[in-house]
Image (cartoon, rainbow, N blue to C red):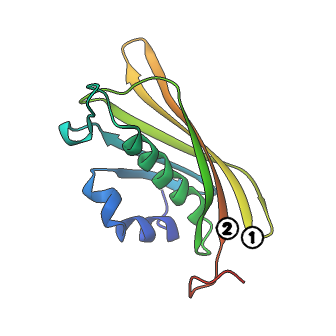
């Protein structure tokens, strides 16, 4: 595993790291991150709040699209919740680049948990990225 711009960005990401997200890999438009569902992440239905699942997917997407080097941000994203996650579930998000064109890109992220029966998909996320200049202004 090589250190790249994605790891530098993640190390400065207080929000994601404060939730216990760990970046396992990020290179060539791909990233893998994990997060354990804690009591603070469980909603009134006794399942993981969807916002936390989205945040894990979004963080992994950010690491994948920033693995190339230029500063890249989300231009938009959507998520489909397939199954629920529960307290103490260890979630794994895998982001894969689908295409890059000009300063834009499309990435898919699958969030799953490991079960005795195998992997259970929790959510599917699609993110659209945009490379920006160093001052944060689109040009």
- The quarter of the picture where residue 80 lies is top right
x and y, in percent, of residue 24 in the image? 41, 50
Mark 2, Cα crowd under 10 Å, few <14 / some 14-19 / many 20+, is: many
**Residue visible at 56% across and 40% down in the picture:** 79
x and y, in percent, of residue 58 in the image? 50, 52
When the figure is inspected, residue 5 is found, relative to residue 138, above or below; the finding is above
Mark 1, Cα crowd under 10 Å, few <14 / some 14-19 / many 20+, is: few
Point out which mark residue 9 bears: none
- The quarter of the picture where residue 67 lies is bottom right
Q: CA distance from mark 2 to mark 1?
A: 6 Å
User: Is 137 on the left-hand or right-hand side of 93?
Assistant: right
Point out which mark residue 130 bears: 2
Question: Are discs 2 and 1 less than 8 Å apart at CB?
Answer: yes
Q: Quadrant of the C terminus?
A: bottom right
x and y, in percent, of residue 53 in the image? 41, 40
When the figure is inspected, residue 77 is found, relative to residue 65, above or below; the finding is above
Question: Judging from the image, what secondary structure is the residue with disc 2 in?
Answer: strand
- The quarter of the picture where residue 29 lies is bottom right
Q: Which residue is mark 1?
A: 103
When the figure is inspected, residue 71 is found, relative to residue 115, above or below; the finding is below
Name of the residue lying farthest toward the front: 44
Name of the residue lying farthest toward the bottom: 135
**Residue visible at 30% across and 58% down in the picture:** 17
Mark sitting earlier along the chain (2/1): 1
**Residue visible at 60% across and 72% down in the picture:** 69
When the figure is inspected, residue 137 is found, relative to residue 61, above or below; the finding is below
Residue nearest the viewer, comparing 31 with 127: 127
């Amino acid at each position: 595993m090589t250190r790249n711009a994605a790891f530098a960005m993640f190390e400065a990401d207080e929000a994601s790291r404060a939730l216990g997200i760990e970046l396992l890999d990020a290179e060539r438009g791909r990233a893998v991150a994990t997060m354990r569902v804690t009591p603070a992440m469980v909603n009134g239905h006794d399942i993981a709040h969807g916002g936390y699942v989205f945040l894990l997917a979004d963080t992994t997407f950010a690491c994948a699209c920033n693995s190339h080097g230029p500063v890249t941000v989300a231009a938009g994203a959507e998520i489909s919740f397939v199954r629920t996650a529960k307290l103490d579930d260890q979630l794994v998000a895998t982001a894969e680049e689908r295409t890059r064109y000009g300063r834009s890109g499309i990435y898919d992220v699958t969030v799953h948990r490991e079960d005795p029966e195998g992997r259970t998909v929790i959510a599917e996320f699609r993110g659209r990225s945009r490379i920006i200049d160093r001052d944060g202004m689109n040009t």
